[in-house]
């Protein structure tokens, strides 16, 4: 995994990341009201669903700005919808 942190724009770019292995770190950035852009990611987070809004889209990336706890039996790891 490689990451770039842009404190001025409050964005973290993460490259070649397995979200299951770095779930706690990703949550810590989201708790600080930062956006996280995934470039080449494997989504295997077990406790949380990362949420985002389509308007936050970065080129060639999946951008999230929040998270919620997974419900029992929920299999998705990311939810990009206008509701977030």
Image (cartoon, helix red, strand yellow):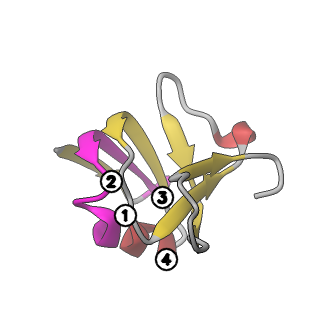
Placement of the N terminus among the 4 image quadrants: top left
Label 4: which residue? 31
Residue mark closest to the camera, 1 vs 2: 2
Label 2: which residue? 19
Residue at image coords 64%, 50%: 79
* Tags 4 and 3 touching, CB below 8 Å: no
How far apart marks 1 and 2 lie (CA) works out to: 8 Å
Label 3: which residue? 10
Is residue 84 shown in magenta?
no
Residue mark closest to the camera, 4 vs 3: 4
How far apart marks 4 and 3 lie (CA) works out to: 12 Å
Residue 84 horizontal/vertical position (percent): 75, 58
Instruction: Indicate the secondary structure of the residue bearing disc 1.
Output: helix
Residue occupying the far left of the picture:
1
Residue occupying the far front of the picture:
73
Label 1: which residue? 26
Residue at image coords 62%, 56%: 51
Q: Is residue 33 left or right of residue 41?
A: right
How far apart marks 3 and 2 lie (CA) works out to: 19 Å
Residue mark closest to the camera, 3 vs 2: 2
Is residue 23 shown in magenta?
yes
Residue at image coords 33%, 65%: 23
Which badge, 4 or 2, is on the more N-terminal residue?
2
Instruction: Tell me the magenta residue range.
Output: 8-25
* Tags 1 and 2 touching, CB below 8 Å: yes
Which badge, 3 or 2, is on the more N-terminal residue?
3
């Amino acid at each position: 995994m490689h990451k770039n942190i842009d404190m001025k724009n409050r964005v973290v770019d993460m490259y070649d990341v397995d979200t299951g292995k770095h779930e706690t770190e990703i949550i810590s950035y989201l708790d600080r009201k930062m956006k996280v852009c995934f470039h080449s990611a494997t989504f295997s987070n077990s406790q949380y669903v990362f949420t985002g809004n389509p308007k936050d889209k970065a080129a060639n990336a999946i951008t999230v700005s929040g998270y919620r706890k997974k419900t029992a039996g929920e299999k998705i790891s990311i939810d990009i919808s206008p509701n977030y």
